[in-house]
Image (tube, coloured by chain):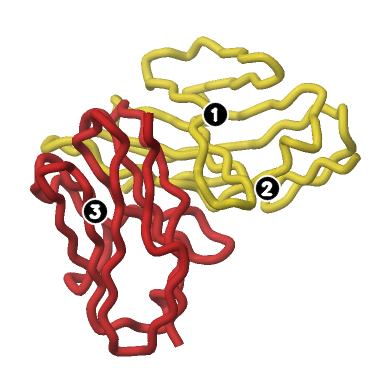
Chain colours: A red, B yellow
């Protein structure tokens, strides 16, 4: 059974640029959630996708957007990058969107904005 | 709004000592789930336990045990006879029902546990 994978592992961008991060969910999982983890902090919920639709969103501006594809893989897009967007971006998949669902996390993408 | 507080930023103990990581949560919802995750240096969050708000039974899994007390809104995690491999950042997290589905997890800031040989 393949776990959650994310690409790329590391990324360096400059202010104002746009970035796309990718996530492949674990086999059999139909829900994907994205989190932002700043250095020394806990992960913060960005949004969740269930069956290709946004299912819930945290306190992030619209320049953070996402997609989920029919195979349940997902993308996180961030436009107009700011220095504070530098963080570890974690993707998590789960079998269902229920609140009790165990979320399986990927290794993350480390984004640095210069 | 939900909130999870892990007051201990860093704990350092010598191997074989017992250690307890504290977690206090806030929510107005009566139905919720609590989680603990471990984050080793590799960065990947590893699920440890899930507990629903209606089940206050303590749980033990090997050297790990969890104490859930609704009266104090706490969900503490104890490692018995700690080992160097337990060194990691540990996160407590909360999940509530938003009506349209589950909100994402609300995490605490984490406790960095250092086990010295």
How far separated are the C-alphas under marks 3 and 2? 28 Å
Tell me if mark 3 has few (under 14), some (14-19) or many (20+) residues whose alpha carbon lies within 10 angstroms of its own: many
Position of A6 relative to A60 (above/below): above
Near-viewer residue (A4 or A76): A4
Near-viewer residue (B54 or B11): B11
* Number of the front mark, 3 or 2: 3
B8 relative to B114 in the view: left or right = left
Query: How many numbered dots are placed on residues in this image?
Result: 3
Identify the chain of the residue marked 1, using the numbered disc in the image. Answer: B
Disc 1 and disc 3 in contact, CB within 8 angstroms:
no
Q: Position of residue B112 (x, y in %)?
A: 68, 49
Position of A48 relative to A31 (above/below): below
Q: Position of residue A3 (x, y in %)?
A: 39, 37
Disc 3 and disc 2 in contact, CB within 8 angstroms:
no
- Give the mark nearest the N terminus, 2 or 1: 2
Position of B17 relative to B58 (above/below): below
Which image quadrant is residue B91 in?
top right
Q: Which image quadrant: the N terminus of chain A?
A: top left
Query: Which residue is denoted by mark 1 in the rendering?
Result: B75
Identify the chain of the residue marked 2, using the numbered disc in the image. Answer: B
Query: Which residue is denoted by mark 3 in the rendering?
Result: A47
């Amino acid at each position: 059974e393949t776990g959650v994978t994310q690409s790329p592992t590391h990324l360096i961008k400059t202010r104002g640029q746009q970035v796309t991060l990718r996530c492949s969910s674990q086999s059999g999982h139909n829900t994907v959630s994205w989190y932002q983890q700043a250095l020394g902090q806990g992960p913060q919920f960005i949004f969740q996708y269930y069956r290709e639709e946004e299912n819930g969103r945290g306190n992030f501006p619209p320049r953070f957007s996402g997609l989920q594809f029919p195979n349940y893989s997902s993308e996180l897009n961030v436009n107009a990058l700011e220095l504070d967007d530098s963080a570890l971006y974690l993707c998590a998949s789960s079998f269902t969107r229920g609140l009790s669902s165990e979320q399986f996390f990927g290794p993350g993408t480390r984004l640095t904005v210069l | 709004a939900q909130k999870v507080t892990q007051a201990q930023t860093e704990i350092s103990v010598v191997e074989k000592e017992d250690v307890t990581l504290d977690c206090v949560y806030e929510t107005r919802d009566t139905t919720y789930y609590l989680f603990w995750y471990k984050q080793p240096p590799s960065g990947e969050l590893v699920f440890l336990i899930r507990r629903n708000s209606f089940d206050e039974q303590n749980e033990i899994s090997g050297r790990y045990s969890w104490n859930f007390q609704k009266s104090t809104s706490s969900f503490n995690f104890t490692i018995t006879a700690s080992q160097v491999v337990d060194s990691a950042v540990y996160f407590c997290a909360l999940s509530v029902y938003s009506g349209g589905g589950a909100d994402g997890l609300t995490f605490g800031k984490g406790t960095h546990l250092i086990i010295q040989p």
